[in-house]
Amino acid sequence: MGEDKRLAAVVALAQGMAAAHGSREAWRAAAAGGCRALGGSFAALSVWERELGRLRVLANVGERAEGEEEFPEDESYPVHQFPEITEFLHERWAGGGEPDAWVETAQGPAAGGRPGYLHQRVAALRRRGRGCCVVAPIVLHGRAWGELYVARPAGAPVFDRGDADFATVLAAVVAAGIAQAERLEEVRRLAYTDALTGLANRRAVDAKLDEAVERHRADGTVVSLVVCDLNGLKRVNDTQGHAVGDRLLERFGSVLSLCGAMLPGTLAARLGGDEFCLLSVGPSADEAVKAADELCRRAAELELGDGVACGVASTEDPIGPVRSARRLFRLADAAQYRAKALRASSPVVAGRAGPDDPVVRLADEPSPQGPAERRRFRGARGDVPGAPPPDPRSA
């Protein structure tokens, strides 16, 4: 391959990884780009998991043999089956050498390979009908991260020393792409995660709730939302300090996660301040109410705070058509407000108080400022017939 073509191949590999959305796409782009650049028929990207002593395959592309999946769940190999890895990690690189690629053939080592043994990699070439491979170590953040493996079929020209040197360059490009993908993944994770509790945040809830309501409108999937207001946080902050208040939030977050696990696939989230929620897609309304009831019980047993006010709204209950995520949120929020106003020790469920359900009425009541929202609920005790004034201790 001429220098211009190799330069173009490097640029294409870098661009492919830069355009990837998420780790899997980055892995596929790395393997596919390396395969094209080296004129291979198959390529794999693998990570070296030191703590487990194994080489785990992340992606396979090209002409896959039987049993090779594009994104394998459990394709891994003990490191002791690959003496060249041990040599690279503990001898050559540790002694100050630079990582470089090498070539193996179905007949044995070649082009900088490791003579003196017939190891697992050579056996794998024969077993899968491949004639040769080039293996390039990937170094990330100053540590051996994994490898790029590119193979050609039996009968094709064997990789040479120039190919191995080029593979070393490609591995460096892959390392830069992986580092970028990891940074983007971390940014995405932080963007959708509450820093204190580790739960999902409001942005994550909004995104998933929009998708869930679309599913409900398309095929009737049950969507349930449990909205919680942690009682007594302000008092804890005022009397014991914000560090203790943060501990209450963290402990309630753990309880929320535990109860959310009762509903497969449920998202547990902190909406902000003392407000939390569970978003369930699929399980029945009764299952969501059961989880909310368990949440109330466990929250009341915490040594800090004064329990939780909990409201539930589910598309399976008689709440009218749910055409938007906003309406389901208003219903759950109104149910939570009623639970707080009544100092209820169990969840209030929208739509289960008869034809003129006060929760549904409150959520759907128009106002000069638009549809009912939480900021209006908090000052609207008259909307909940018979409700006592809120206890200032539970604010």
Image (spheres, rainbow, N blue to C red):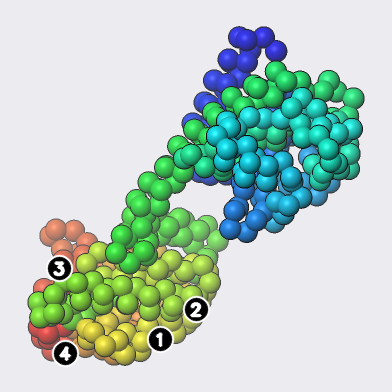
Counting residues from the start of the chain, the first of labels 3 and 4 encountered is 3
Contact flag, marks 2 and 1 (Cβ < 8 Å): yes
Q: Residue at x 16, y 87 (%)?
A: 387
Return the mark for residue 80.
none
Q: Which residue is mark 1?
A: 294
Q: Residue at x 70, y 51 (%)?
A: 79
Q: Residue at x 53, y 72 (%)?
A: 264
- The image shows residue 89, relative to residue 388, as above or below, that is above
Q: Secondary structure beneath disc 4?
A: loop
- At label 4, the amino acid type is Gly
Q: Which residue is mark 4?
A: 386
Q: Which residue is mark 3?
A: 376
Return the mark for residue 262.
2
The picture places residue 22, in percent across and down from the top left corner, at 51, 43
- Which residue is at the front of the view, 328 or 118? 118
Distance of mark 2 from mark 1, alpha carbons? Answer: 10 Å
Q: Secondary structure beneath disc 1?
A: helix
Q: In the image, 28: left or right of 317?
A: right
Distance of mark 4 from mark 1, alpha carbons? Answer: 26 Å
- Which residue is at the front of the view, 278 or 150? 150
- At label 2, the amino acid type is Met
Counting residues from the start of the chain, the first of labels 2 and 4 encountered is 2
Counting residues from the start of the chain, the first of labels 4 and 1 encountered is 1
Q: Residues within 10 Å of mark 4 (few under 14, many from 20)?
A: few
